[in-house]
Amino acid sequence: MSATLTMKPEATAEAEARAKVERAEIDASTRLPVVLFYGSAVFWLLVGTLFALLASFKMNAPTFLDQWGWLTYGRVRPAHLNAVAYGWASSAAIGTGLWLMARLCRAPLRHSTLLIGAAIFWNLGVLLGTFGILSGDGRSIEWLEFPNYASGMLFVAYGLIAVWAVIMFRFRQPGHVYVSQWYLLAAFLWFPWLYSTANLLLNFQPIQGGAQGAVNWWYGHNALGLWFTPIGLATAYYLIPKVLGRPIHSYYLSILGFWSLALFYSWNGMHHLIGGPFPAWMISASVVASVMMFIPVVTTAINHHMTVRGNFQALKWSPTLRFTVFGAMCYTLSSVQGIFMAIPSLNVVTHFTHYTVGHAHLGLYAFFTMIMFGAMYYILPRVVGWEWPSARLIRWHFWLTAVGIGMMVVVLSIGGILQGLALLDPGVTFMVTLEYTKPWLFLRSVSGILLTAGHIVFAVSFTMLLLRVGVRKTEPTLFGSDQGRKPERLTV
Amino acid sequence: MMSQDPNKTQPEAPDTFQMDMERDDINVRDVHGAILREKDDPRDGYEPIPLWMVSIFMALVFWGGAYLAFFSGGFQADVFDPSQVAWGAGAGGAEKAAPDPMVVGKKLFTANCVACHQATGQGVAGQFPPLAGSEWVVGSDWHGDNHLVKLVLHGLQGPVQVEGTTYNGAMPPWKQLKDEQIAMILTYIRNEWGNSAPPITAEQVAKIREETASQTEPFTQAQLKAIPAVHFGGSAESAPPADGTDAPPEGGEPPADAPAATGTPTGV
């Protein structure tokens, strides 16, 4: 451990001790905002999962719960999307982002009032928005279904967070700015820009005609690409070397990955509109930018892989690392899949099918959500001052979610391709194309049940940690630690 | 030195750390176990970017440029088909492909004319005259190109002879159509169903529209006959010779040659 510092031995020991005290102060200062955002994230994860299950069951049995307008498919499905995107994923992203921000700035968190205000506004916004969608107030614009009274609140919350992030960055301790910081600061500034622009042009002062579609997908894709992705990557860039105690493979790859992502991602959205009534250059520019995403994706994948290389046995022990590496690998997988889906000759098959739904879950769940789970497993013991109560619960959580999401992506991909080929065949009627998807949608519901079970296990584990259930442990809760096994080369 | 508080042996949380203690007397036992055991913050390694990666990325960028060159429709706002290569000839939009009158004209014809003249151009026997082979359409004999434009602009009423048959109906005026639309329709009907005659341009329609601005009623055959026939292919004018009772054409040549000449002035 001490070999990483190049000072005199005695100075090294003191510097290490100082660094630890500093971290303890920082972690203590982040406690309330992090727990607030994480707590609301877990709450909305459960709510969003419930809506997801309902929507999925309605695909298997269309008359299920269709008597009451509030629970019809057209409302439950956007309620699911918005509850998980803004309630779960964004809250988890903010919680993780602000802890990382404080840690990387090496400064105790300032102005936590801003963040607590933001957390209240955010939750109020998501609550009102979800309620609005269910009551029939939803806007029929994908990713922006929240009615205006809710999206306004989210924007206020987000504005507070962005201001806070800039202040934190301004008062960081001098020194090298690590790659995670670039992604964090960028994401904290990108998202309010995306969210306000899209809401202004689509909901508050709607622009005319086809341009709405362009703005819609510019936002829809960038919410993933310029908000969730940078936060997810910042987390992976921090946690992987942190848990392993190794330097990140290459600073140059980090730079290339960051700037190529920033350059290409915001052009990607139009590939959702291939074949639509848009000038050819818009679509083609987006196809090219989508293929160019190969550059940041491969760069990041290699940077992460080379950092973990030789230490894969650590995945056997560390929950943080297992979730994070799973997520990082799925980032590569999901992005490469997305690149191929943007190629017009393949897009013609996958467009308007369940394949796209599978792809969205590969990105937002297998990549982003799994990394957020990994981050929570790392951050919460430090912030709360209590170890995770049970390795068995973490193990169940991992396998239920990993198998669940793997199964969902596989069955939706197969079902989607069959559906897409059938839709292209003029000899097949529309009703028959639906028949093809039935068994796969049934399996999707099964995978959804696995995910739901995983989330309940996680929520139980999370609540036990917050309530400090059990005895105080001095050892970390590692996979296998409840079976009396000891990790070989891992101290975390 | 801080005193060993017995309660401190089981620290509650990091926030119990005493901030006021002397900095050089750090008792790390007050720090929570998770922080005690954690490793240093991540650092950067400085491995170079491998050459193979740079090569692949350069190839990708090259592909991207080529793709944009071929499928961007010249970056024009009104090109919607990515496979339409609108770059190369001329500067951007200057060389935009002109609309094909046989395509656009057919659409306009279908929208405005088929009800009477039928998609086959045969009209309806006894009611609506045919366009296929009609001397009115191809501008042969005394039915100059100008007469065709005039009757479409202002309509036609009373008895008319077409291909040896007399029809007595009424064609409404079509002056609400734009010059280029009328030009497209006329060019289309002059080159469909076996017809073959020079195209009518929007400028020609515009000119005649201006000349006949005072016309308020639909034309009659007799009225049209009184107007000298003009063949747009050239400047030749022939006096109305129809029925063989009127004066011979001034050009000295039979006007029947005119349409076949496709643009050659009949009088020269």
Image: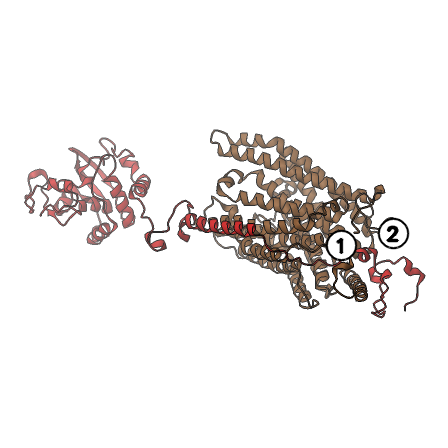
The quadrant holding residue B46 is: bottom right
Q: Is residue A79 visible?
A: no
The crowding category of the residue bearing disc 1, from other C-alpha atoms within 10 Å (few below 14, some 14 to 19, many at least 20), is: many
**What subunit carries mark 1?**
A
Q: Position of residue A317 (x, y in %)?
A: 77, 45
Q: Which residue is mark 1?
A: A379
In the rendered structure, find residue A472 and report the number of the disc placed on it: 2
Q: Is residue B249 left or right of residue A33?
A: left
Spot occupied by residue A369 in the image (x, y as percentages of width and height): 68, 47
- Between A435 and A308, which is closer to the camera in this rendering? A308
Res. A488 visible in picture: yes
Chain letter, brown: A
- Please name the amino acid that badge 2 sits on: Arg
- Classify the position of the N terminus of chain A by image quarter: bottom right
Per the image, label 2 sits on a secondary structure element best described as: loop
Of residue A174 and residue A351, the one placed in the foreground of this image is A174
Dot 2 falls on which chain? A
Query: x, y percentage for residue B76?
Result: 40, 53
Q: Colour of chain B?
A: red
Q: Residue at x 45, y 48 (%)?
A: B67
Kind of residue sitting beneath label 1: Ile
Whether the residues at callouts 2 and 1 have beta carbons within 8 Å, the answer is no
